[in-house]
Image (cartoon, grey):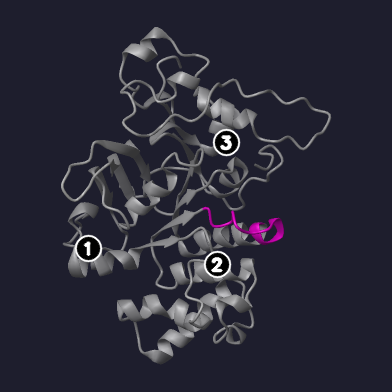
Amino acid sequence: MESVSNTPEAPNARTPGSEASDGEPLVAVHGLTKLFPVGAGPFRKPSSFIHAVDDVSFQLGHGESLGLVGESGCGKTTVGKLLVKLLEPTDGEIVFRFADDSVAPAADDPWDSAAIRGRLLRSFRRRVQMIFQDPYESMNPRRTIYDIISEPLSVQGMGDVQYRVDRVLEILTLVGLAPAGAFLFRHPHELSGGQRQRIAIARALVIRPSFVVADEPTSMLDVSSRTGVMSLMQDLATELGVAYLYVTHDLAVARYMCHRIAVMYLGKVVELAETEELLRNPLHPYTKALLSAVPVADPGRRRQVPDIRGDLATPIDPPSRCRFYERCPAATERCLNHPHPPIEEKTPGHLVACYEV
């Protein structure tokens, strides 16, 4: 991780909030759960389940960005895939309220993700997109840049050929690839990592979605390319009003990109607050450990060793108690003998799942 303290705050960041101007959030997630079976076979039921996402709830407002941070394997990417319907939830509810209700199931009705099928699914895809982590594996190497970016327009039946060419040229210019015409008929292998990721962003935004899941879009890039892509995504969010769910393990990136941060551990959200509030006043022991592990730019400054023990527990059929119990320096008998603590508001806008806070 880069030093959080030395990372500039996000430019043009508006006042954070989870709701739109009309009081309704863009997306509301309630009790989201995803279990993957273990030990299943053609003639036997699964004997165990991986609790990848377990009872996760949050809201995201129009034009807002929410960062999901945590260790590898904590369920961040699974949450993102559930929101864009690349995976179906085991339980819970995902409700979208798009500002443009012309494509809604009925006038002023929310979109219930579980009920979206058939033609409604195509309309849903027009409003919800995903930027994948690896710009080298998420594109067909045999297709041209024009084919890659224009495919969503073709699938959605948007405009004729001339409209699609004009729209691709427009979005290429918007993501900083100029002259745009020079990129139309090139192939992915002819581009650098930063240019490929800009193509991935262009592909996601070419149909003007309202909500984008960005799955660690800068983790595969070098530092110089990373900064440019982050600034680009900030500018596009401001210009186009796109809301982001930003999946990352890097708190410095989350601070730059996000209005609020949700910290995940073993499928659970354990803390959620506005970005600066969470970084300056972490309450959950796991969040404190994450922040203490961030490198400091001053070589003369002594770092505090993270006060946790052991390794990440298995997500297969975890006990009902607090997921962080075995590693927590503040664990008590109450944590051992009670179910996982619910996430509750401890101070205004600051939610924590811990009995001892």
Query: Mark 1 highlights which residue?
Result: 104
Residue 203 vs 131, above or below: the answer is below
Magenta portion: prevailing SS class: loop
Magenta highlight on residue 218: yes
Residue under the point 66% across and 39% down: 4
Q: CA distance from mark 2 to mark 1?
A: 35 Å
Query: Mark 2 highlights which residue?
Result: 136
Query: Residue 68 — which label?
Result: none
Residue under the point 61% across and 61% down: 229
Q: CA distance from mark 3 to mark 1?
A: 35 Å
Quadrant, the N terminus: top right
- Is residue 82 found left or right of 284 in the rendered image? left
Residue under the point 53% across and 29% down: 287
Comparing labels 2 and 1, the label whose residue is closer to the camera = 2
Q: Are marks 3 and 1 in contact (CB under 8 Å)?
A: no
Between 339 and 272, the one lying in front of the other is 339
Query: Residue 276 — which label?
Result: 3
For label 3, count other residues whose C-alpha is less than 10 Å away and answer few (under 14), some (14-19) or many (20+): some
The amino acid type, in three-letter code, at marker 1 is Ala
Residue 269 vs 95, above or below: the answer is above
The amino acid type, in three-letter code, at marker 3 is Glu
Comparing labels 2 and 3, the label whose residue is closer to the camera = 2
Horizontal and vertical percent for residue 283? Answer: 51, 23
Q: Earlier in the sequence, mark 2 or mark 1?
A: 1
Where is residue 232, by image quadrant? bottom right
Where is residue 279, by image quadrant? top right
The amino acid type, in three-letter code, at marker 2 is Tyr
Q: Earlier in the sequence, mark 3 or mark 1?
A: 1
Find numbered disc 1 in the image and state the secondary structure of the residue it sits on.
Answer: loop
Q: Which residues are magenta?
A: 216-226
Horizontal and vertical percent for residue 151? Answer: 40, 78
